[in-house]
Image (spheres, grey):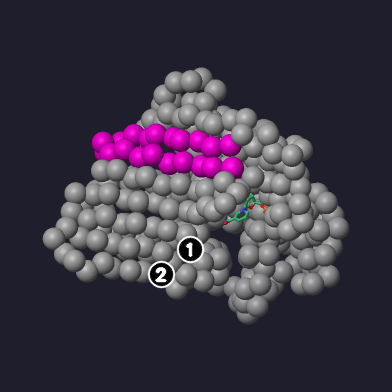
Amino acid sequence: MAKDKLRVGLIGCGGISGAHLPHLSSSEDVELVAFCDVVVERAQKKADEFGGQVFDNAEEMLDKVELDAAYILIPTYAHGAPERACIAKGLPFLVEKPLGIDPADLRKLAKEVEASGVITAAGFMNRYRKSVNRAKDLLQNDPAILMDGAWIGGPPLVKEGDYFSNAPIGQWWPIKEKSGGQFVEQVIHTVDLVRYLGGEVTEVFAYAANGFNKKLPNLIPNYNLDDAMVVSMKFAHGGVANIMSCCSAQAAGGVFLNVWASGHNSRFNDWAHHVNIQQAGQKDIEDIRGDIDDIFPTEDRAFINAVKSGDRSGIRCTHADGVRTTLLALAANESLETGKPVTVQY
Ligand SMILES: NC(=O)c1ccc[n+]([C@@H]2O[C@H](COP(=O)([O-])OP(=O)(O)OC[C@H]3O[C@@H](n4cnc5c(N)ncnc54)[C@H](O)[C@@H]3O)[C@@H](O)[C@H]2O)c1
């Protein structure tokens, strides 16, 4: 029988918790009962605002508090133990992207999660946008032949107002061994759309630009990322894609993805993924704003409804699916290391 109120706990109380908490806390069918962060003051701050118990260890939280669902909102390098703590308790979880940094452990974890049967969702929220799903519908009968996309931003700098030097994420994002790098940590949203729209990718080959940001006098000291990457991909169905990252552009930047098929194209731009769709032989351009969807609430609602009802059909990205996107992004790093094309091992 469906429960009236789900008891939800958070594992990780940093920046992205601020995207999920406003509507979780105002949802009548959700009760926030526990907060966990290895920096316990961050969990305490959330508990002060929303109520609930405070922990610095996920296993202990799950042992001591009866939960119906968990949110895992932790850095790339920290995955594994919190997910395993959830499946040990049979606890459904929503996990933010990327889903891990070690491909071998990720494949193992994905099998353990699947075997547990728990309801899961991965935080690729763009899959819930109307713009994205309109493009996906068109691609069913007119598949993508080419995709090109990019996520262009500036370097993390020691200066007032810089997101990275003034937030906890600055302690791990600029370190490739911890975040996976910009391509894995950030551009993974575009990589996920490549898979969601185009199907499975079988092979990748990557080049990187390095050494440009290092010349900046105010670069955040722990930075060791690639300044830019170009990653070529081959789809199982025969199409190709080229996806790029850049964290070196101080003048301007942006997010875009172009999807080129025989009879139409879809051109996405901005973090909100507005889309312009053009059909061959037609002058009119279909224009769908990405921000007509309040996207984090939509993603959270799909997960909460699935946990309440047991019907997972509304979840657009499961842990298993999110792992595949993460493995694809990590394969680009492997290609950089080996200097060779890499067959993606899912
Ligand atoms: N969907 C999106 O658009 C989006 C946007 C921002 C961040 N994210 C993702 O969310 C994740 C977290 O990012 P963030 O910006 O919140 O980072 P953050 O550094 O602000 O917060 C992460 C928090 O997790 C805590 N933590 C680390 N290991 C932990 C563990 N084992 N148990 C409990 N807490 C632990 C840290 O102390 C920190 O407070 C990242 O993977 C990031 O890519 C997604």
Residue at x 44% of width, y 35% of height = 231
Residue at x 59% of width, y 30% of height = 210
Q: Which residue corresponds to mark 2?
A: 289
Q: What amino acid type is highlighted by mark number 1?
A: Ala
Which label number is shown at residue 272? 1
Residue at x 51% of width, y 67% of height = 295
For the residue pair 58 and 263, the one nearer the viewer reads as: 263
Q: Look at the numbered disc 2 and give the secondary structure of its residue.
A: loop
State the quadrant of the C terminus: top left
Residue at x 34% of width, y 45% of height = 147
Confirm or deny contact between disc 1 and disc 2 (CB under 8 A). yes
For the residue pair 162 and 329, the one nearer the viewer reads as: 162
The answer to whether residue 227 is above or below residue 87 is: above
| Stretch in magenta | 227-248
For the residue pair 60 and 146, the one nearer the viewer reads as: 146
Q: In the current view of this chain or complex, which residue is farthest to the left?
A: 281
Q: Look at the numbered disc 1 and give the secondary structure of its residue.
A: loop
